[in-house]
Amino acid sequence: MTHPYYTFLDGGMEVDIASIQGGELPIDPSSFYFMVKTPEDDRYLNDPVAQAKVKNSIPIAEADIGQWRLFNIITDPGETKNLARSHATTFQGMLSRYGRYQRDHGVLAPPVGYRPMHQVLINALSAQYGESILIFLLTVLVLTPFYVAYRLKQRGR
């Protein structure tokens, strides 16, 4: 987590740390052992702001991910500088044109319970691991009943 956190932070972005329910995130102490510790880990260990974000992560449902933003992808391909306030007229015009497009073409609102970050995670896993993640999940689904039966059988002895 430390590497992307500091990469985004150093890129000029505001970085929040979110988790499913919010609150303190568990960190495996062995991730800070000298054999695997990175410079970003050292930075984290001396960064009270980052540590506070880990101790008090925000619930993913409260993360501000649905807000519209405006970027100049030619001068800012990493989309780090939101121009919505500094170009308010352009931004409002784009929003109004999108509203008109939405109405004219019957664009549906996201279904109740739709979570954009959940879909982003699914898309990222699919793009990164493709079929192997599907094979893994199917293997887990197939083997879980056998494991449960085995454990119940052991308990009965």
Image (cartoon, rainbow, N blue to C red):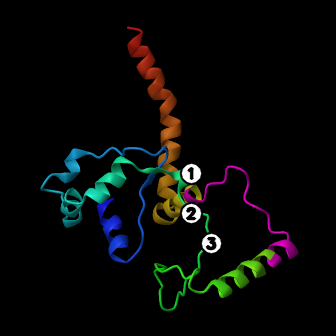
> As rendered, which of 83 and 112 lies closer to the eye?
83
Look at the numbered disc 3 and give the secondary structure of its residue. loop
Identify the residue shown where x is 51% and y is 28%.
Answer: 145
Instruction: Write down the residue under mark 2.
Output: 65
Residue 46 shown left or right of residue 22 in the figure: left
Image coordinates for residue 94, horizontal then vertical, percent: 71, 83
Dividing the picture into quadrants, the one containing residue 70 is: bottom right
Identify the residue shown where x is 20% and y is 47%.
Answer: 30
The alpha-carbon separation of the residues under discs 1 and 2 comes to 9 Å
* Amino acid on which the number 2 mark rests in the picture: Ile
Identify the magenta region. Answer: 100-117
Query: On screen, 15 above or below 111?
Result: below
Look at the numbered disc 2 and give the secondary structure of its residue. loop
Identify the residue shown where x is 48% and y is 80%.
Answer: 81
Q: Residues within 10 Å of mark 2 (few under 14, many from 20)?
A: few
Magenta residue check for 10: no
Numbered circle sitting on residue 68? 3
Image coordinates for residue 91, horizontal then vertical, percent: 66, 82
Instruction: Write down the residue under mark 1.
Output: 61
